[in-house]
Amino acid sequence: MAAASGRDLTVLELNTRVRELFRTVYPYPIWLRGTLAGRIQANSRGHTYFQLVDNTDSASRPQASIDCVLFAGARTVVQRDFARAGMVFDPSEGIDVRILGRVDIWPQSGRFQFVVEAFDPGSFGASSETRLRELLAKLTREGLAERNRTLPFPALPLRIGLVSAPGSAALEDFLTTLRESGYPFEVLLHPAQMQGAETMRTVVEAMSRLALEPSLDVLVITRGGGSATDLSWFDSEPIGRAIASFPAPVVSGIGHEVDFTLPDFIAHTRAKTPTHAASILVDRLADAAQSIDDAARDMAASSLPRLRSEGHRIRAAASMLASGVSMFSRSVSGALDRNEAWLRAASGRSTSRAGRELERMAARLGPPGCLVRFPERGLSLDDCSRRLRTASGALIDVSRRRLDALSALVAARDPARMLEMGWAIVTDGEGRLVTSASCVEAGDRVGIRLRDGRISARAVEVDMDGAS
């Protein structure tokens, strides 16, 4: 095959001529329609690279594709255009778009690409509401839309993770409501941009850090009201996924009552305003405090009748014990009186016997003068008196020892002392003293008084001593 006349071209010259050819054929920007594909993310310089492919069935490969680039300067213009249309510029794979740009080739590499200058908001997949519905439907199919709602909301949400813009009115309203409640809240604030292109990245990063905090009771995401464009930055799939997978219940307090964003549908609880988000937590604690007070009152009310009943039983037992002690004391006192009378009688008898013996001895000795003449054969009156006193003293000592023994017996049989020694006092259901097994039948309730308390029991079986 004959070669074209002229000198040889270098690679750079060829790429440059092709570039000039493109610019000759397409001197003006053209609209290109297709589906976004590949990873769509801005690099460190703010330039965004992606692919645009022809629409095809999901089961087949794209029929054609072209590399595209959206430079940082053009991206700023695109974001402004979307904001004016009440939308958020958030390109993702699979969205059908209509883009404006120029066909170009990079001479140094020969790379063929479409340089994007604008996106048509009206063709950007769908409207903001449709986009929100699609995101919610996608997360629902994956089982993520309800995941955070399955977490139990703590009764005492005192340790709070907070994602909000530092210095914002929303943050101040939220914190003021918590402070005025008087409850000891602990707030861990991780700041994020709550509007603009950095919303998704900073919110997800803040949530990721808070997810690592130990013992976090609840997470609150809050910002004040704004336009639909301002709030639509939260209609982001990464934010929705981060909320769904958060380990604690999430409260979404974004915008005002009429505003709805994706977090409102994924979070555990939706708050109408930042102040309302704080009020939800305060009310939770107030309810817990009220429940504790109610339980304390119920406990006191239910315990009072039993305390009164036990008080009656204790007083009855004390009365029975006092009665028993009194009866025992009277019995011992009677015994002491009888012993004293016996002692006096015995002493009198002994004295009488000693007197008679003295008289007999005096008669045997004869006249008193004999006592002078024969002292070795008789007893003087003084000797007899001394012997009488000695005998009476010995008898009194014996009686005193018997009295001491009886006193010790009384002390040993004191019911209080018997309880200290391990004995027990048994009463029937009416509080009467049980002195015999025959006083109790199987099934009767009995009270058992011990040293340090009382036992209520029921007789299961009654065995009489000596019974077969």
Image (cartoon, rainbow, N blue to C red):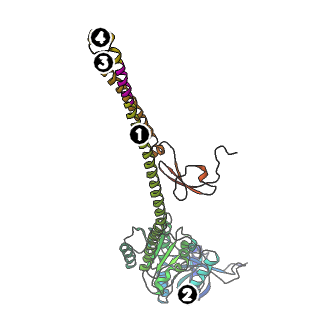
Dot 1 falls on a residue whose secondary structure is helix
Estimate the x, y position of residue 245 in percent, counting from the top left.
Answer: 56, 70
Comes first in the chain, label 3 or label 4: 4
Comes first in the chain, label 3 or label 1: 1
Q: Label 3: which residue?
A: 383
- The answer to whether one can see residue 406 in this image is yes
Callout 4, which amino acid?
Pro
Asked if the residue under mark 4 is in contact with the one under mark 2, i.e. CB atoms within 8 Å, the reply is no
Q: Which mark is residue 199?
A: none
Looking at the image, is 389 positioned above or below residue 372? below
Q: Which mark is residue 129?
A: 2
Comes first in the chain, label 4 or label 1: 1
- The residue drawn where x is 43% and y is 34% is 405
CA gap, disc 2 and disc 3: 137 Å
Estimate the x, y position of residue 342 in percent, counting from the top left.
Answer: 41, 35
- The residue drawn where x is 26% and y is 13% is 369
Instruction: Decide which of 352, 129 is in the foreground and name it.
Output: 352
The overriding secondary structure of the stretch rendered in magenta is helix
CA gap, disc 3 and disc 1: 34 Å
How many numbered discs, if any? Answer: 4
Q: Which mark is residue 336?
A: 1
Q: Is residue 355 left or right of residue 157?
A: left
Asked if the residue under mark 3 is in contact with the one under mark 2, i.e. CB atoms within 8 Å, the reply is no
Which of the two marks, 3 or 4, is nearer to us in this view?
Answer: 4
Callout 1, which amino acid?
Leu
Asked if the residue under mark 4 is in contact with the one under mark 3, i.e. CB atoms within 8 Å, the reply is no
Which of the two marks, 3 or 1, is nearer to us in this view?
Answer: 3
Q: Which residues are magenta?
A: 349-360
Q: Label 4: which residue?
A: 375
- The answer to whether one can see residue 213 in this image is no
Which of the two marks, 4 or 1, is nearer to us in this view?
Answer: 4
